[in-house]
Amino acid sequence: MSVCDFNSHVREKINEAEMASALLSEIDYYAELVGKRAVKSIFFGGGTPSLMSAKTVENVIGRISDKFELSKNIEITLEANPTSVEASKFAGFSAAGVNRVSLGIQALNDHDLKALGREHSVNEALEAIELSQKYFKRSNFDLIYARMGQTIDQWQSELLQAIDMANGHLSLYQLTIERGTPFYGKWKKGELIIPDEDASAEMFELTNQICAEAGYPAYEVSNYARPGDESRHNLTYWQYQDYIGVGAGAHGRITVDRQTCATEQNKKPETWLKAVRNKGHATKVMEPLDKKMMAEEMIMMGLRLTQGIGYHDFKTRIGAPIEDFIAVDQWDLLKSQGFFSEDFPDRLQLSEKGRPLLNQILGRILA
């Protein structure tokens, strides 16, 4: 089980003491609901949690420690933007108990950072990476590739630079243009040029090859790590384990009395805060999940992993075999075309050919 918080909203002023008190109230509420279970990871993410004070982070970790059993090797991650103001707070976060940081770098040249709407410079990014490795035993930073106008050679050069600076983990995401965003409108008008499908596919293959050769094999579609440095928190999602979400807009999956429920907190900070004041928590949704919903979620999350989903693990979690929830004819067809791996007969696992087509494959087998 893991605990996360925070949501992305822009406010000129916030009352941090009130927000911190509300987070503690939600932790108390969920501790009462699920009992004193073991916590193996804590993740401060969404929005910009590094704008919090180290004291707030320390208090949240302390309350979780009081209410739950913390694993001896607990992973406590904080997401941060690589601005000089935030990076300067790393010493305080480390002292508060954070032992892993994840930096939103996204690009290693100033032109592309500006095009992506990022406020930091490359120099700030490089300084933040160096500082993160000074204060935290484990760290991650992310990059986006197949960016506007990017060539395969340019991405290879940037990736090699990133690997040279990395400290055990890299998140490498292929740029996708989402409907409803400013990027989508520009792309539809032809004002935004991104690499074509063939070039993007080649970048994906190159990324996997270079990272593997450098000792950073892919363990998930977009995540690469030295063995032992995988994100334990994100593995909680992908392996379909329980996690508690506290804070504005947080989501969770918790099992109470053998029933797994999806939870969702009020998204708008003011609404969330008011609800916590009134009833001790701001849970907007507490929806019991039936077997079909759980099965589909477990398949969608588990196929993101390079190792896929163990058939035994699936049946233990869901109570029925995986074949009951997928279109077996489509599965057999895709398997014959090489999109599923047959190296491990006890697992449902995409091949390297299938992994970049995850969404399309899910659309076929879950239809």
Image: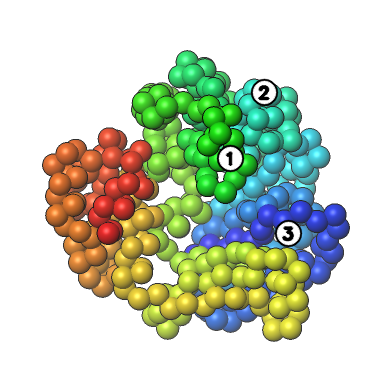
Q: Secondary structure at mark 2?
A: helix
The nearer-to-camera label among 3 and 1 is: 1
Give the mark nearest the N terminus, 3 or 2.
3
Q: What residue is pinned by disc 3?
A: 58
Q: Secondary structure at mark 1?
A: helix
Mark 1 surroundings: few (<14), some (14-19) or many (≥20) residues within 10 A: some
Q: What residue is pinned by disc 2?
A: 111
Q: Which quadrant would residue 63 be assigned to in this image?
A: bottom right
Task: Residue at 56%, 34% (x, y): give it.
Answer: 189
Q: What residue is pinned by disc 1?
A: 185
Q: In the rendered image of this protein, does residue 49 appear above or below residue 188?
A: below
**Do we see residue 205 in this rendering?**
yes
Which residue occupies the foreground of this view, 177 or 334? 177
Give the mark nearest the N terminus, 3 or 1.
3
Cβ–Cβ under 8 Å for marks 3 and 1: no
Instruction: Tell me where residue 300 appears, x and y as whole percent.
Output: 36, 56
Q: Amino acid at mark 2?
A: His
Distance from disc 3 to disc 2, alpha carbons, whole Å, reads 37 Å
Q: Secondary structure at mark 3?
A: helix
Cβ–Cβ under 8 Å for marks 3 and 2: no
Q: Amino acid at mark 3?
A: Glu
